[in-house]
Amino acid sequence: MMRPSTLAALTLILLVSILSFQHFQVAHADTVLLESKALSYVNNVLPFDMSHYTITVGSVYSFPSAPNDPTITQAVDIDSRSSDSTIHVVCVYVNGAFHQCGVSPTGTPPVSDRTYASVKDVAARILQAHQEQTGLDSTGLLNALNLVNDTETTNVTLGDVSLGVSHFPDITGLQTVNGMPVSYF
């Protein structure tokens, strides 16, 4: 027969073990969810014909946050490779919600999912696919896109919506994370 103190200690150890394992399961589930979200975004939103590429999804990694800041910023690297090109993608999530996606192609130009007339045409395709993927209303951004000049890098404002469209890598205010330029938070 066990003494009450031994039974209490074993119960406490078992409870701590269960809680620690549950935290690992939740953290692992969140990581798998972000990897899955990022892969789905690459396959369904980006204007590439992914059937020409072998896709490798990297691990989720976190950005440091300021002291006392509860914001959790995480990213997922995805590499899509063909025999003559690579598309490196970094999808960034803030508190589990999609924040941005940076794309860096190398080698021959990526295989697109259709023919595009202009950067504005590509941006419209991405905004429409983003709306379908996330369920977020992109109407304001699509309306602002109508004001963008096709021949130059343009920033436009329509009401409380601001939109900038440019050829990569003409984006300013960047830092490099894992070799990929991303907006500084």
Image (cartoon, rainbow, N blue to C red):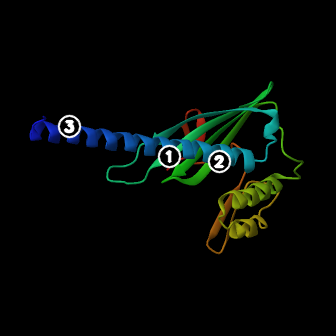
Looking at the image, which residue is at 10% across and 39% down? 5
Disc 1: CA contacts within 10 A as few (<14), some (14-19) or many (>=20): some
Q: Quadrant of residue 174?
A: top right
113 and 25: which is toward the camera: 25
Q: Report x, y in % for residue 27.
A: 44, 43
Q: What is the number of the mark on residue 171? A: 2
Looking at the image, which residue is at 32% across and 49% down? 67
Label 3: state its secondary structure. helix
114 and 154: which is toward the camera: 114
Residue bearing mark 1: 30
Mark nearer the N terminus (3 vs 1) = 3
Q: What is the number of the mark on residue 15? A: none
Q: Report x, y in % for residue 62.
A: 46, 41
Q: Is residue 105 above or below residue 23?
A: above
Mark nearer the N terminus (3 vs 2) = 3
Label 1: state its secondary structure. helix
**Mark 3 vs mark 2, CA separation in Å:** 58 Å
Looking at the image, which residue is at 23% across and 38% down? 13
> Could you tell me if residue 136 is visible in this image?
yes
Q: Quadrant of residue 42?
A: top right
Residue 14 horizontal side relative to residue 99, left or right: left
In the rendered structure, are the residues bearing label 3 and label 2 in contact, judged by CB atoms less than 8 Å apart? Answer: no
**Mark 3 vs mark 1, CA separation in Å:** 30 Å
Tag 2: amino acid = Ile
Q: Is residue 45 above or below residue 20?
A: below
76 and 20: which is toward the camera: 20
